[in-house]
Image (cartoon, helix red, strand yellow):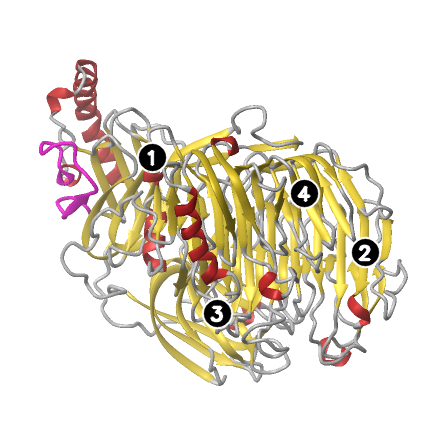
Amino acid sequence: MPAVSRPARRRILASVLTVFALLLGSAFVVLANQANAASALLSQGKPATASTTENAGVPASAAVDGNTGTRWSSTFADPQWLQVDLGATATIDQVVLNWEAAYATAFQIQVSNDGSTWTTVHSTTTGTGGNQTLAVTGSGRYVRISLTARGTAYGYSLWEFQVYGNVSTGGGCGTDNAALGRPATASSTENAGVPASAAVDGSTTTRWSSTFADPAWLQVDLGATVNVCKVGLNWEAAYASAFQIQVSGDGNAWTTIYTTTTGLGGVQNLDVTGSGRYLRVYGTTRGTPYGYSLWELTVNTSGGPTSPSPSASPSGPLIPGGGDLGSNVIVFDPSMSGATIQTRVDQVFAQQESDQFGTRRYALAFKPGTYSGFNAQIGFYTSIMGLGQNPQDVRINGDVTVDAGWFQGNATQNFWRSAENLSIYPSAGFTRWAVSQAAPFRRMDIHGDLNLAPNGYGWASGGYIADSRVSGTVQPYSQQQWFTRDSQIGGWLNGVWNMTFSGVQGAPANSYPNPVYTTIAQTPVNREKPYLYVDNTGAYRVFVPSFRTNTSGTSWAGGQTPGTSLPLSQFYVAKPGDTAAKINAALAQGLHLLFTPGIYHVDQTINVTRANTVVLGIGYPTIIPDNGVNAMQVSDVDGVKVAGILFDAGLVNSPILMQIGAPGSTASHASNPTSIHDVFFRIGGAFAGKSTTSLVVNSNDTLIDHIWAWRGDHGAGIGWDVNTADTGLIVNGNNVTGLGLFVEHYQKYNVIWNGNGGRTIFFQNEMPYDPPSNAAWRTGANGYAAYKVADSVTTHEAWGLGSYCYFNVNPNVVADRGFEAPNRSTVRFHSLLTVSLGGNGVINRVINDTGVPTVRPDTVPSTVVNYP
């Protein structure tokens, strides 16, 4: 845009600020140089590039020319970036920003060795412009300011972008041990005689040793960011057969620089390349029945670059937001005939009806308007969704159906499908949605009855409804259990074992166990799932509902759902084949993520580090971690939303599939928590996947809104020693709320709750089917409870919980109890049950030592109304 097009007021303001900056600038630079006597100004006169420039008179180079009368300025859009090539890898300790009037309220300072993979060393969402001197710790050849929110209606503009630090002249790998005597910590210690510090004390007669469990880690703080070139490990007899060496700039976000699954112990000297202040050894598989034990951990460093010099234009183009949704999102509009729509949805259903562990994924998306004359049958990995802002914007005079003909009328394997944001006027007066787990029914407006059973009333094991309205009666019939949240219904027909309602207008009265209704008037904390829609100009947007408390009924029946609308241009639209590196680069650039249907293999962790980031999947995008990496990590920040993702454990064991917050997170997020919605985990079934823990929640106040964590009991790669997985969910954060937790078949405690103030409304569990014997399952006790509240917890409350056993490999296996918790008046449970399916095994008690054993051979629940 030509400079003359700017308003006169802006030009006058810029002129005044120019003079002011010239008066202050020299003094400021002098002061900055005085403050950095040990550091050099590295950026001045170096090659600079930018995402955009407003015009030829404000190039990127003007921000690094040492002249406070020239500047870089971007176009008037978010996000943007400005980058400088320092010419060699340097240790960075300070960045100075001299803003023109067009400043950033939200930005990150990032460093990179290759101009592609970036590490954030400073982040803010409260920038005020002016002159900013930022103390940072990091190293890299390239330094970038990634700009995500403007403070004015204009672009971003910097008089100067100054980077201070030191470039080492060393080239080889040094011989000094950088870890010697440095502070060391560990995930655990076997006893006081084997502390973490003993592994970095220089003595080969003292050692660190962990407890006898996987995973475990040992970490050393090197004091400053260094380039690591070699790591030495001197193992005691208790070695790791699988482990990673990882580095971090902040002790939170980790990068793996070495990994193996064939470790043999002894003395290992590992050549590595990476940089960070912190280094850790992350053990995932022990080589003995004992823990992990190291006589010594040594770290050698170098002053040279940590990676080869990249080719010209290392940064590449700005990763664009928006774009098309790909071939697996099938979009319909009201101009299409019912016959045309029927043909297309039948084609998808023919592929997906019985393809339980296949690789195809689809989203059927309907633009606003009225449709008639078709029945959309929904198979595996298929989402049907309206693209209106509210359910009434898409009206279907016809049917959306899930039945179980493919499985002879048995709906217990009708997994991984969804319906969202539609108004249905069913042809026969009712909609059939005969599903089991991972099949959410959200923002649906049903004008008639809703039948949750398959034709013929075969078995079913669902399910989940949220933010929906059913004018008629919900008819569970054969459904074993169901959770309905924040909805409006005309009536509810019956229940089998566990029907739980939270914030549901029209729900039956609380009466557990006869009938089996657990009813809570309001949901204590709530945020509805983000969703894709089309605005009145035809542009795609994502609506992000607000965080609310004490809710009931739908969010939309009385008007618009409260929340925020984001344009698709602010999202990186990921497609199958995208690498984790590219996805992470898009996140670092300040984009949100929209995963389109498909399979995504990731060879590094997807790191979500920015507050309020939205990660939304449509059509069951499936993330498979390769080589034992953790699939996704969310930093301990406010307001991240992750929705609609299936994590499928890879062939090499991942310690964790998804982590929210770093271990030890302490920040409060009570007014704007991170939330996950319709996030599913699978261990085995498609192949022999492995993961120690599926979901770890370290951040306080996190909201878990519908998960299914499933260690497979059928399909490919199934067996006690094949698809191994200890625990589905570990909660370490305080004041975490779970709304609809489905966690099944894990080999130890299915859920471990360590944080205080936790709440769960509805929990469904089956214990592992396949313990070969009680001795193989656990030493010293009969099995593991499904839901374990740690002995240290002082406050916890849960409603509507069921655990079932079906020990079909050995029906003589016994579990001591379904639920285990400290016996305190402030740790409370309501409406619990255990049941033995077909008499295959016994659960002796419901909770602790309360409740009668499950009856054999009849499938009759044992119940406890309140505990204690």
Residue 361, image quadrant: bottom left
Question: 201 or 58, which lies in front?
Answer: 58
Instruction: Look at the numbered discs 4 and 1 and tell me whether their residues touch, using CB distance below 8 Å.
Output: no
Above/below status of 846 relative to 198: above
Instruction: Look at the numbered discs 2 and 3 and tell me whether their residues touch, using CB distance below 8 Å.
Output: no
Q: Earlier in the sequence, mark 1 or mark 3?
A: 1
Check disc 4 and report the residue beneath it. Answer: 484
Q: Amino acid at mark 4?
A: Thr
How much space separates mark 3 and mark 4, taking CA atoms?
A: 32 Å
Q: Amino acid at mark 2?
A: Leu
Crowd tier of the residue under label 1, counting other residues whose Cα lies within 10 Å: few below 14, some 14–19, many 20 or above: few
- Nearer mark to the viewer, of 2 and 1: 1
Residue 650, label in figure: 3
**Quadrant of the drawing holding the N terminus:** top left
Check disc 2 and report the residue beneath it. Answer: 833
Residue 539, label in figure: 1
How much space separates mark 2 and mark 4, taking CA atoms?
A: 18 Å
- Nearer mark to the viewer, of 1 and 3: 1
- Nearer mark to the viewer, of 2 and 3: 2
